[in-house]
Amino acid sequence: MKIKTIEILMIIITIINISCEKETSWKFKRGNLETIVVNSIITNEYKKQLVKISMPSGVINDKDLPVSGAYVTVSANDSVFVFTESDTLLGYYYSRTPFVAIVGTEYRLNIVYKDSTYTAKASLEPVEPFTFLSYSLANDSSGMYKIDWVNQDYNQKEQAMYRVDIDWSNLVDSTIKDTVTKKLMYFYSFKTVDVSEAFAPQTEKIYFPKGSIITETKYSLSDDYAAYLRALQAETAWRGGVFDEQKGNLPSNISPNGLGFFSVCAVIKKTVEVK
């Protein structure tokens, strides 16, 4: 029986990975630590919208430093929405009044921090309906469940992000400390076909009990925001596989020389109880 070409390729790759390990001393180049990092998704949900602002830390794997005392606004057409910093969460700026993002409208972010002004703009893409994720019993005697598939309605013309929240805190005694009762996962649908994604390292297996509440939220993605998320995945979740991409800086729409991304997304969500 002939072995398929792809099987031969996988055998060769496995041998290379096993036989070509060596200790490496990494040299890190210090980047621009004086700029801001923006993390914001304005949505079509009627709520107080959020703009999170931080500064990069000078220590590897440390959390970003919150930026406090900035003046933040988001404008669209003739409307200007002022954001104020949370009293309890430094670097978290919420709009003073709730508002909804509208398809076809350009939204402009303006941040004044110390002596610098940062700007960004983004528009809302519509979001298509989706089929809720599939789950099933795990292949063991634990009685736990696992996620089988997310994004069963793949559309090559649409790019999307899927947020999956799993909560079973209602099933656990609230007095028990350090008990994990919630999980959060993200899945992406890009127009590109990425070898680094196909051969990415295995991720943690998530198991949850009967009675858990699953909420799946789908976000529409503009092409530039999708490019940012794809680059972020290539630098994080897809890193360490067989075909790593060349390292590089993430794209950003924060000018001048800002980091992170300001995006506007349409969202739809569905919630089910595991039965």
Image (tube, rainbow, N blue to C red):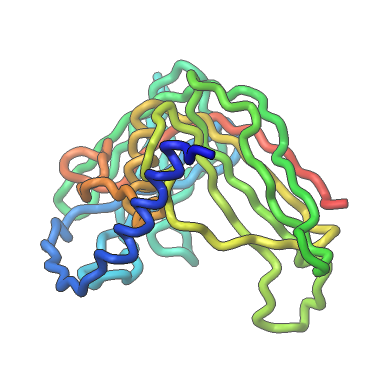
Name which quarter of the figure residue 91 lies in: bottom left
Q: Residue at x 57, y 40 (%)?
A: 162
Q: Residue at x 40, y 44 (%)?
A: 8
| Left-right relation of 220 to 234 | right
Q: Residue furthest right?
A: 275
Name which quarter of the figure residue 143 lies in: bottom right
Compared with 126, 109 (above or below) is below
Counting from the top left corner in percent of width and height, residue 9 is at: 37, 44
- Closer to the camera in the image, 76 or 264: 264
Q: Residue at x 56, y 38 (%)?
A: 98
Counting from the top left corner in percent of width and height, residue 73 is at: 36, 39
Does any portion of residue 46 appear in the rendered image?
A: no
| Left-right relation of 121 to 127 | left
User: Dividing the image into 4 quarters, which one contains the N terminus?
Assistant: top right
| Left-right relation of 77 to 97 | left
Counting from the top left corner in percent of width and height, residue 20 is at: 25, 64
Compared with 202, 23 (above or below) is below
- Closer to the camera in the image, 253 or 86: 253
Counting from the top left corner in percent of width and height, residue 27 is at: 12, 67
Compared with 165, 108 (above or below) is above
Q: Residue furthest top?
A: 104
Q: Residue at x 54, y 48 (%)?
A: 186
